[in-house]
Amino acid sequence: MATIYDVAREASVSTATVSRALRGRPEVLPEVRQRVLAVADRLGYRPNRLAQALARTHANALGLMLPADISHPFYGILAESVARHAIAYGYELVVGLPALPSVESYVEAAVDLQDRRIAGLLVCANSKTIAEYARNRRAGAPPLVALGCLPDVDVPLVTADEEAAGHELTQHLIDLAHRRIGFLGLGPEEVRPSGREHGYLRAVTEAGLPSVLRGADRTMEGGREGAIRLLEGSPGLTAIIAHNDAVALGALRGLFEAGVRVPEDIAVAGFDNIPQSRYSIPALTTVDLSAEEMAQRGLEMLGRHLGFVEGEPDGRLLITPQLVIRDSSGPARS
């Protein structure tokens, strides 16, 4: 299926120009619009109607772009918090979602959302996706603030200090005498390790311990399968750190199926402190990356750029993570 990227490349224009040309925006030159329409017709491209429906025109609104996979509770907490704080500032919230779990689909939906009558935009996705979107923003686009990532582009952002989170959680397990700690990291689609993984690597290196890395889908099933692979490939493992709480909860299931006790045989920990982490058996040790504070600080930063919050616009804010120790992490077995 052709994407907006394909049309932009063939027509030698930006994705933003493609989006505006397909909607008949007056700032697009007639000859450019005809070229875009001809290429779109030849490639069989159809605009992302889902994103357009989710991003209807609102004069007094802020936009929030989320990833395609919003099943993880972190995104629900973030969206609810952004909406609540936006209302307190007198704004509605318009949420955009990509139709497909790809960088191209996200950029297409974000470009469509930015072209609506929104005052400003909060964008939440991985670093690669945000960087690609930032490179495709048109001149005069509404101000944006990135949430939850550190993209390789100069954009205002609010995110948790994920490297510090990874280091603190790993050090917690090292302090409990764990000497072989596995990490279920991002899947192979990611182009570089996350800050959480960097923090883990720094902690085990400082302690003179080996790193044991395995890729996993960022889902409960990915955690279940990843934990089983770690058991099979890493004899002597005494602890597992998962990229997020959903993966960690899946790992708990995989270890249970394998007859491994947590934390007596293997300790398990994750990141995000989602509500479900309190109710697992055993309750999950995790790091709270504070979606609530991220939403509040992100809106304050956007507000300073728009003028509805006092103060000079700032660029980057790292939120300090909080280690939450529960039952799933205990001393290493003898």
Image: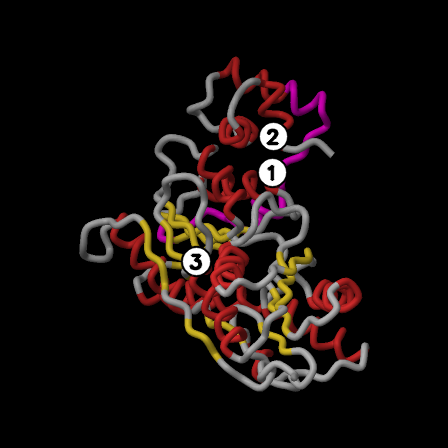
Q: Residue at x 54, y 84 (%)?
A: 326
Magenta stretch encompasses residue 60: yes
Left or right of 79, for residue 1? right
Residue underneath mark 2: 5
Vertical side of 180 occupied by 43: above or below: above
Q: Position of residue 76 (x, y in %)?
A: 54, 67
| Most foreground residue, 65 or 333 | 333
Image quarter where the C terminus lies is: bottom right
Circle 1 residue = 104
Magenta-highlighted residues = 38-61
Q: Exactly how many numbered labels are in the figure?
A: 3
Disc 3/disc 2 C-alpha distance (Å): 27 Å
Tell me if label 2 and label 1 are in contact, CB under 8 Å. yes
Helix, strand or loop at mark 2 = helix
Relative to residue 251, is residue 89 depicted above or below? above
Please name the residue that numbered disc 3 is placed on.
93
Q: Secondary structure at mark 1?
A: helix
Q: Quadrant of the N terminus?
A: top right
- Residue 111: x and y, percent? 50, 38
Real-space CA distance between mark 1 and mark 3, rounded to the nearest whole angstrom: 23 Å
Say which of marks 3 and 2 sits in front.
2
Measuring from the top left, give residue 180's x and y in whole percent.
63, 69
171 magenta-colored: no
Q: Is residue 84 left or right of residue 238?
A: left
Q: Amino acid at mark 1?
A: Glu
Q: Secondary structure at mark 3?
A: strand
